[in-house]
Image (spheres, helix red, strand yellow):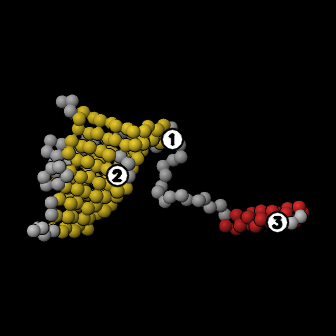
Amino acid sequence: MTKKRWWVFVLLILTVAAIRLVVQGWQPVVVNDRPTLSVRIDYRFDDVDYRELDEQGKPFFRLTTPHLTHDPEQDLAIAQAPNILVKQPDRDWHISADEGHLQRDSNAVQLLGHVLIASEEAQPPMRMESEELRYYAQNRDIAADGHVRLIRDRAEATGTGLEGNLISGKYRLLHDVEITIHALDE
């Protein structure tokens, strides 16, 4: 191919690309379908281990995460794969999720993606599963808007929306509630 034909070929490709851009418009490539908060992060901490103590100086809340970043536009701390331990007199609660959002002026932790709350050591063991959940540290309340699954002993309850309190042990599914009692294993 001669030099002149080469430039004609390159010019043809650029012309086709320009026409395609004008006709179809600019469409950015979406890498994932999860909404992003912002592209600015002003700081990042790795291997975070945060603990809160009660009035007697005993630990009652612990948050661990491999990465904690801060979004300055929303004044929001974002924890990747957070693990939360909430100590109660009668049982300890282990909470995990794909991501956690902590607002500076709020005592709530918004948990997103594969949220699991479990208290396996206490009797009877209990477990809650959801795609999103809010944990309010001050009064140990929990709330969810989406689908929730509760498992305790032989009972399994599913529904949409949840209100509850980790101290009292009372939980209420708000809509579309279904309960299944499993038979005893013999």
SS for tag 3? helix
Would you say the residues marked 3 and 1 are in contact, meaning their CB atoms lie under 8 Å apart? Answer: no
Residue position for label 2:
97
Question: Residue 120 location, x and y as percent?
Answer: 19, 52
The image shows a total of numbered marks equal to 3
Quadrant location of residue 154?
Answer: bottom left
Disc 1 marks a residue whose amino acid type is Ile
Which quadrant: the C terminus?
bottom left
Eye-nearest disc, 3 or 1: 3
From the viewer's perspective, is 15 left or right of 2?
A: left
Q: Earlier in the sequence, mark 1 or mark 2?
A: 1
Q: Nearer the viewer, residue 181 or 76?
A: 181
Question: Residue 34 location, x and y as percent?
Answer: 46, 57
Q: Give neighbour class at mark 2: few <14, some 14-19, many 20+ (Cα, 10 Å).
A: many
Eye-nearest disc, 1 or 2: 2
Residue position for label 1:
41
Q: Give neighbour class at mark 3: few <14, some 14-19, many 20+ (Cα, 10 Å).
A: few
Q: Residue furthest left?
A: 186
From the viewer's perspective, is 46 left or right of 139?
A: right
Q: CA distance from mark 3 to mark 1?
A: 44 Å
Would you say the residues marked 3 and 2 are in contact, meaning their CB atoms lie under 8 Å apart? Answer: no
Q: CA distance from mark 3 to mark 2?
A: 53 Å
Quadrant location of residue 21?
Answer: bottom right
Residue position for label 3:
9
